[in-house]
Image: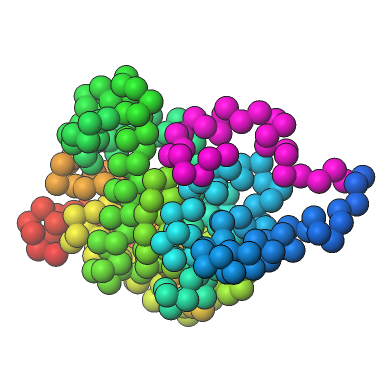
């Protein structure tokens, strides 16, 4: 695959089975020492060092992945920009994106970073979410911005280039939202970069094989549940003060590590200035948070909390 070419969202669908499996070694064929992926990578690095150039980006972890060309194309910019040096493990895989733990380049000051790579067909699950579309700018093939479902439907009928631009704009909006909230003091991973269909951010967890678990996978002690609940509510209020509502908040997109919560997945965040219906999303976010913490003895009136917060936002009293 030509990694210098921009990959379109449909490229993965065009891969033949033979191409997808070309990197695999048949199980009944014993690989020689020279064919080992780590050895080959080391040889390439040595050759590049002697030539005074940077070795090609070819992580051994991806050698047997069916979507290897797509992931390589998605992450290569981060490698060329000296943000990552290798892909070490898969953190999680969802219907819209896969998150990888990568070795960070020394220039970042970090040991590991997380790379979120969106799938080619990610927008199938978003095409009916009009409330999200109406609350953010849409970009057509010529880079023109507009808001609302009418604009979205118009861009959906355009060329492949237009659809790719729309996807890139959606992902860039997530990155910019995460940057906005992190800079404001929110408990979110520090975003590092965004390129095409990938976002690079701080990795939360221990070694590559031990990422921070989702909050839904954790049993909290009663004594720590209450302060964590208050912390999440303060984050929701901070987001709203920054003109953002998460829109899909639950224990499925909060990480728990060393007694603290880090909130992720801002792909569906909305700006309440452009859609009054966002108040319903805010109420749903708070209801889900209250429902989760109730199992650990935290009592709260979700409707009252949401109403008070929304009214204070409308009065510019946050």
Count of labels in the image: 0
User: In the image shown, does 10 or 314 lie closer to the viewer?
Assistant: 10
> Residue, x 29% and y 62% (percent of image)?
179
In percent of width and height, residue 62 lies at 65, 52
Q: Is residue 3 magenta?
A: yes
> Residue, x 43% and y 39% (percent of image)?
6
Q: How are the residues colored?
A: rainbow
In percent of width and height, residue 117 lies at 49, 49
> Which residue, as the protein is rendered here, is positioned at the far left?
315
The secondary structure that dominates the magenta segment is loop
> What quarter of the picture does the N terminus occupy?
top right
Q: Is the residue 274 above or below the residue 162 in the image?
A: below
From the viewer's perspective, tell me whether residue 143 is left or right of residue 51: left
In percent of width and height, residue 285 lies at 35, 52
> Residue, x 32% and y 35% (percent of image)?
165
Can the viewer see residue 309 in this picture?
no
From the viewer's perspective, tell me whether residue 203 is left or right of residue 312: right
Chain part drawn in magenta: 1-27
> Which residue, as the protein is rendered here, is positioned at the far top?
157
Q: Is the residue 190 above or below the residue 287 in the image?
A: below
Can the viewer see residue 124 in this picture?
yes
> Residue, x 45% and y 30% (percent of image)?
124
Q: Is residue 243 magenta?
A: no
User: In the image shown, does 16 or 312 lie closer to the viewer?
Assistant: 16
User: In the image shown, does 63 or 236 lie closer to the viewer?
Assistant: 63
In percent of width and height, residue 32 lies at 87, 56
> What quarter of the picture does the C terminus occupy?
bottom left
């Amino acid at each position: 695959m030509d990694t210098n070419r921009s990959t379109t969202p449909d490229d993965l669908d065009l891969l033949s089975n033979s191409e997808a499996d070309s990197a695999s070694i048949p199980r009944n064929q014993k690989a020689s020492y020279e064919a080992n992926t780590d050895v080959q990578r080391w040889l390439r690095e040595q050759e590049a060092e002697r030539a005074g150039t940077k070795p090609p980006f070819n992580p051994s972890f991806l050698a047997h992945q069916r979507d290897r060309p797509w992931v390589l194309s998605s992450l290569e910019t981060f490698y060329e920009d000296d943000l990552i040096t290798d892909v070490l493990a898969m953190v999680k895989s969802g219907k819209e994106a896969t998150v990888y733990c990568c070795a960070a380049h020394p220039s970042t000051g970090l040991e590991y970073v997380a790379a979120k790579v969106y799938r080619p067909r990610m927008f199938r699950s978003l095409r009916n979410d009009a409330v999200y579309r109406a609350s953010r700018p849409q970009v057509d093939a010529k880079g023109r911005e507009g808001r609302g479902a009418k604009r979205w439907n118009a861009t959906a009928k355009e060329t492949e280039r237009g659809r790719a631009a729309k996807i890139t704009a959606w992902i860039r909006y997530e990155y910019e939202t995460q940057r906005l909230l992190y800079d404001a003091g929110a408990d979110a991973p520090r975003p590092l970069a965004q390129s095409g269909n990938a976002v690079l951010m701080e990795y939360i967890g221990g070694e590559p094989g031990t990422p921070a678990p989702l909050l839904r996978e954790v049993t909290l002690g009663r004594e720590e549940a209450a302060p964590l609940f208050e912390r999440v509510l303060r984050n929701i209020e901070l987001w709203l003060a920054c003109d953002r509502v998460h829109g899909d908040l639950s224990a499925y997109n909060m990480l728990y590590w060393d007694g603290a919560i880090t909130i992720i997945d801002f792909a569906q965040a909305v700006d309440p200035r452009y859609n009054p219906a966002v108040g319903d999303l805010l109420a749903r976010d708070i209801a889900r948070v209250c429902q989760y913490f109730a199992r650990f003895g935290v009592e709260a009136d979700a409707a009252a909390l949401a109403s008070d917060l929304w009214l204070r936002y409308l009065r510019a009293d946050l």
